[in-house]
Amino acid sequence: VARQYGTPTYVLDEADILRRCREYRRAFDGEVAYAAKAFFCVAMARWIRREGLSLNVCTSGELAVARAAGVPTSRILAYGHAKTPADLYAMLHYGVGRIVLDSVAEVNRLAAGTWGRAGKNRQAVLLRVAPDIDAHTNPARADLAGAGLALSPDGAEEAAARVLARPELELVGLHCRLGSQVTGLGPYLRAADQLVGLLARIRDHHGVVLEQLDLGGGHPVAYREGDTAWTPADLSRALTEAVRRSCATYRLPVPRLTVEPGRAVVARAGLTLYRVVTVKRTVGGPLIVAVDGGVSDNPRTGQYGADHLVRLVGRRTNVPLHHVTVVGRHGEADDVITHSAMLPGDIRGGDLLAALGTGAYHHSMASNYDLVPRPPVVALADRRASLLVRRESNDDLLRRDVLACANGSIS
Ligand SMILES: Cc1ncc(COP(=O)(O)O)c(C=O)c1O
């Protein structure tokens, strides 16, 4: 792959992604809506469609890709804690099956956009609720305060009353999301109970029984040995049982459960190939290995202190392993791939390294920092490589620069 496509390059194991999609589908009776923000392109959207998953999108850009892949609108859930008018327009124009609303003001905005619709043509809506719990996730991965309606009479209950009063909208369920890498089941179980309590209050006040309960994603991934991870089957058993118990307490029929895994589907299927540019031996400090990528393709280390296993690939050596810090080419304090690689002491410029577990939130969060073109995405299946997203070029970057276009600088 490195020879054919250069470095850095994101590499995906297609079979691993398909296997995890199937595990989720088998484990959950309800709906599994893959969160596009973890990693998305037309190939990924096609895999999701083919494996029978639904899709969770939050921008007009993600919708454009879903559209390019022909994902049926009935299987798309669109959300966003601050949907722009362009996002809302795209969601309505494409006719997404369900829109998750985040605030009372958004109810009015959506109603205005759907004005005149009625009956079967109503826009199906879920309300995003912020449960009153601490998910004990890394603060950098917890959800933003203000994402979701408060569980209070003037929050979610007021929004429910407003949606139910609009003939253009159909309230079909409740939604919540706790954060990412939520390593205990307890927060999910408490959230399920609080949301079922709200379903019961909506029934009591409005005589309406909602049929969907979306408990979001955030399922943990074991990036390193010893990290917590659940199988979809474990998760399904715990969530289904908790929802059933709460529904029995409130005498409610059990709603259809939706989960929205992102990283749990794609993170482990990905690695990033880097070429070593230079090796620096600091006095008394760690060996520093600088590669030809960095924070522009791997923003997670800086954002949430993520750390990736890094391996030497493509060359065998018996030289003992050394403790190594692998850094990027950008020279920022957070431009680190890992502080704790164990690599052979003869590591040198030109060697190939693989950073593991980079399938989620790498390609989707990559930037052009230092005007570095973003890496390609290559999928491996049956030992064959195929290019899903090509490498960006300097011309791609110049194409957005109006003066460069005007003076003919693009080759
Ligand atoms: C509404 C929603 N659902 C699902 C996800 C996916 O989370 P994860 O990739 O941690 O499973 C996110 C991520 O931010 C999200 O905002």
Image: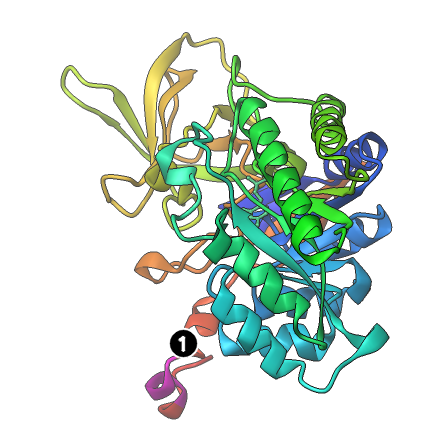
Q: Quadrant of residue 75?
A: bottom right
Using residue 181 as the reference point, say whether residue 205 is left or right of it.
right
Q: Can I make out residue 36 in this image?
A: yes
Q: Quadrant of residue 278?
A: top left
Name the chief secondary structure element in magenta.
helix
- Report if the beta carbon of the residue with label 1 is closer than 8 angstroms to ligand 1: no
**Camera-side residue of 1 and 30:** 30
| Mark 1: amino acid | Leu
**Camera-side residue of 352 and 208:** 208
Percent across and percent down for residue 61 are 58, 68
User: Is 159 rendered above or below residue 222?
Assistant: below
Please tell me whether residue 392 belongs to the stretch shown in magenta.
no
Residue lying at 61% horizontally and 44% vertically, measured from the top left: 198
- Residue that protrudes farthest toward the left in the picture: 283
**Camera-side residue of 295 and 32:** 32
Task: Tell me the residue that label 1 is attached to.
Answer: 398
Q: Which residues are magenta?
A: 401-405
